[in-house]
Image: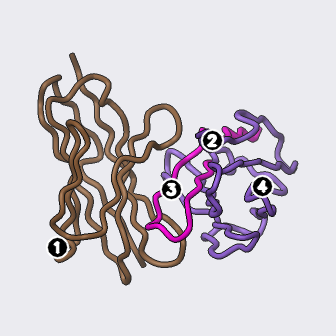
């Protein structure tokens, strides 16, 4: 079974621009979560989607948004990029109804200059 | 506020040593605790623990949870250089978010 896939793997953007990252979950997984990983803060939860509904949101500004499509694929968007948004963005998927084993994709490395 | 604290933050051992990594948590509503291994890429799932006192094992790795004392340990026996990684502990406490600790960076030297 194919794992979680994320595109693109690397991205360089300029301050003020916006970016969209994509995540395809493991087949059959309907819950998708997004995390930001930085050296200083570690892994921090952004949001979680199930059945196209955001069920949980972390403590991030409104510039961070996401959505999920009917095929469970998910996208996250960051508008008005800041230097501090440079990070590894990780997507994880899980089955719903089993106790919450989340499987991570390879991540998108975003660099904001 | 829910919190996960891992110790030590870093560790250097020789091949063949046994290591114990610690994870303690302060939560309002515990549901499960997970361990991940992260090399220079995405975290890889190791174990999920929901019940106290039941050991999970996979080869040289094992983990156990103590819900009364609010901690978990990850043991690695007969360490190998390939065990060098950051080990992350995370908890499902409320909502649908994993709450991660800062990780323990393990270096196994030949």
In the rendered structure, the residue with mark 2 lies on which chain? Answer: A
Q: Which numbered circle lies on residue A107?
A: 2
How far apart in space, not on screen, are marks 1 and 3 (Cα)? 25 Å
Vertical position of residue B7 compared to residue B86: above or below:
below
In magenta segment, residue B22:
no
Asked whether the residues under marks 4 and 3 belong to the same chain, the reply is yes
Earlier-in-chain disc, 3 versus 2 = 3
Dot 1: few (<14), some (14–19), or many (≥20) neighbours within 10 Å?
A: few
Give coordinates of residue A11: x percent, y percent.
Answer: 76, 35
Q: Secondary structure at mark 1?
A: loop
Chain B tint in image: brown
Counting from the top left corner in percent of width and height, residue A96 is at 56, 68
Residue A102: give its label: 3
Chain given the colour purple: A
Chain letter of disc 4 in the image: A
Magenta-highlighted residues: A90-113
Q: Nearer the viewer, mark 4 or mark 3?
A: 3
Q: Are marks 3 and 2 on the same chain?
A: yes
Q: CA distance from mark 4 to mark 1?
A: 39 Å
**A99 left or right of B87 in image:** right
Q: Chain of mark 1?
A: B
Q: To which residue does mark 4 refer?
A: A75
Q: Residue at x 55, y 61 (%)?
A: A95
Q: Residue B19 appears at what percent x and percent y?
A: 16, 40
Q: Are marks 1 and 2 on the same chain?
A: no
Nearer the observer: mark 3 or 2; the answer is 3
């Amino acid at each position: 079974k194919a794992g979680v896939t994320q595109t693109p793997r690397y991205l360089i953007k300029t301050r003020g621009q916006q970016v969209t990252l994509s995540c395809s979950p493991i087949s059959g997984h309907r819950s998708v979560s997004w995390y930001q990983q930085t050296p200083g803060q570690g892994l921090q939860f952004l949001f979680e989607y199930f059945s196209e509904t955001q069920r949980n949101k972390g403590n991030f500004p409104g510039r961070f948004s996401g959505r999920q499509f009917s095929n469970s694929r998910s996208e996250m968007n960051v508008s008005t990029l800041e230097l501090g948004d440079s990070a590894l963005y990780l997507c994880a998927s899980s089955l719903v109804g089993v106790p919450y084993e989340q499987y991570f994709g390879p991540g998108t490395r975003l660099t904001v200059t | 506020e829910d919190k996960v604290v891992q110790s030590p933050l870093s560790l250097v051992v020789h091949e063949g040593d046994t290591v114990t990594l610690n994870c303690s948590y302060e939560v309002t509503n515990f549901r499960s605790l997970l361990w991940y291994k992260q090399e220079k890429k995405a975290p890889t799932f190791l174990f999920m623990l929901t019940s106290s006192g039941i050991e999970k094992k996979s080869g040289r790795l094992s983990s156990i949870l103590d819900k009364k004392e609010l901690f978990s340990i990850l043991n690695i026996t007969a360490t190998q250089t390939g065990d060098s990684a950051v080990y992350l502990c995370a908890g499902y406490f409320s909502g649908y978010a994993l709450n991660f600790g800062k990780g323990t960076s393990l270096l196994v030297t030949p």
